[in-house]
Amino acid sequence: MNSQPLMTVRILAAPRQKIGAIPHGMRSIVPVIGGDFEGPRLRGKVTPGGGDWLLLRSDAVLELDLRVTLETDDRALIHMSFQGLRHGPADVIAALGRGEVVDPASYYFRTVPRFETSAEKYAFLNRIITVGVGETRPDGAVHRIEEIL
Amino acid sequence: MTSCPLMTLQVLVAPPQKLGAVPHGTRAIAPITGGTFEGPRLRGKVLPGGADWTLLRTDGVLELDLRITLETDDGALIYMTSFGFRHGPPEVLAALGRGESVDPSRYYFRTAPRFETSATQYGFLNRLIAISWGDRRATGPIYTIEEIL
């Protein structure tokens, strides 16, 4: 598989809104309050206002469904969304739930980000398939995103 | 980023239903009439009845939105969806449009498949992120699908 680094996105999150048991599983919503991103071709800030609509499925897999807006250092706006999956050994997931720092190699946290922008300079983002390797942090998450070539 | 082979999937398509200009672009629906898949951990056939809801955007990118059902050789059903992009130089896309064989390295055709199944022997499919490389043939595409590890 051929890929190249696109960017690392650091998401800062507010406390979860725990919706609780719903027909598809356990729903909680994580508001995004900021963050930053940096890669060879783009860098900037994560704007406040997005979120990650989490669903813990009955098979213990956490489904992620994130929508955020990125603002580049030259003021272009980029809509980023992803769907993803997070799962791992019960003790590791429990430690993450307690807000502990855990080696991301000890669990599976992968996403498929998509982008939309009207800025010509960043229009390549509208046409690429990407994969993110995620890491849950006490204050949010870090996603290392690669472009699939 | 590391990955491992999941399967090679060949789908057979009927002539597209050309809906023409819709608010998001040019819509064409390609019914899937069958096909086969094979990988180290699963193999079988594609059931007729799915389709690829393609949308040609104004920026020349073809969005793919496939939904099919796979049936393994031991009788399990697997629901597969796949969102992706296809784009390339105009002369290459024109040749594909005429049904000619084109070296797939001359255009970008990548998708992100997802799977759902209740079969416990294939439950790993519910928990993985995957990427595929497409090769558009006259009878339908061939997807080389890798699991992101």
Image (cartoon, coloured by chain):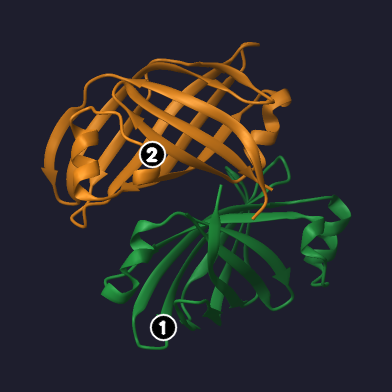
Position in image of residue B41 (x %, y %): 45, 76
Position in image of residue B129 (x %, y %): 45, 54
Q: Secondary structure at mark 1?
A: strand
Chain in orange (letter): A
Q: Which residue is at a point 27% across and 27% down the rendered structure image? A: A30
- The residue that label 1 is drawn on is B72
Circle 2: residue type: Pro
Q: Residue B144's image quarter?
A: bottom right
Image colour for chain B is green
Circle 1: residue type: Thr
Mark 1: few, some, or many residues within 10 Å (few <14, many ≥20)?
some
Residue A104 circle label: 2
**Mark-to-mark CA distance, 1 and 2:** 33 Å
Q: Is residue A81 left or right of residue A98?
A: right
Q: Residue A5's image quarter?
A: top right
In the figure, B104 relative to A48: above or below?
A: below
Residue B20 circle label: none
Observer-nearest residue: B140 or A134?
A: A134
Q: Which residue is at a point 69% across and 31% down the rendered structure image? A: A123
Position in image of residue A96 (x %, y %): 24, 34
Q: Residue A138's image quarter?
A: top left
